[in-house]
Amino acid sequence: MNIVRVAQLSKNDGLKMAEEAGLATGTVEDIVAEGSAVDVIFDLTGSPDVRQQLREKLAAAGNRHTVIAPESIARLMWTLMETGEELPEVHASGGY
């Protein structure tokens, strides 16, 4: 798996982890601008508004390639990668 970019709604532990790992960070718009270079977007926000925003921006860009994976899939993959680390808590207020 190749991580292209990490976007966060606010400064949090997830963004800090990404920056410390040397990953590119940015906005939802930056991720959408990557186009078909992004196969999967892992949405860990827990925010239905973010999920909707992602869908709308991908559709507006004509991107029918990139899929949005829910948090449960991201957590499953993280567990299978056996990193020994916990995913940081990055939920928006309210959640699903």
Image (cartoon, rainbow, N blue to C red):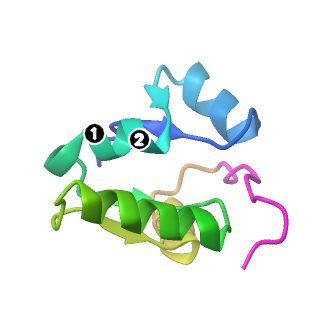
Q: Is residue 70 above or below residue 61?
A: below
Residue that lies at the very extreme toward the right in this rendered image? 93
Q: Is 56 situated above or below 90? A: below
* Image location of residue 69, percent across then percent down: 42, 70
Q: What is the magenta range?
A: 85-96
Q: 52 left or right of 15? A: left
Q: Locate residue 96: give its quadrant.
A: bottom right
Residue in the foreground of this view, choosing between 1 and 46: 46
Percent x, y of residue 26: 49, 30
Q: Which residue is mark 2?
A: 29
Residue occupying image coordinates x 20% and y 46%:
35
* Residue marked by disc 1: 33
11 vs 83, left or right, is right
Q: Residue at x 49, y 28 (%)?
A: 25
- Amino acid at pointer 1: Ala
Residue at 58 percent across and 62 percent down: it is 50
Answer whether residue 52 is visible to the viewer in this image.
yes
Q: Nearer the viewer, residue 44 or 57?
A: 57
Would you place residue 95 above or below residue 50 in this image?
below
**From mark 1 to mark 2, how far is it between C-alphas?**
6 Å
Q: In the rendering, at what x and y percent does residue 72 appear? A: 56, 76
Q: Is residue 72 above or below residue 81?
A: below
Q: Are marks 1 and 2 in contact (CB under 8 Å)?
A: yes
Please indicate, yes or no, whether residue 74 appears anywhere in the rendered image.
Answer: no
Q: Is residue 30 left or right of residue 66?
A: right
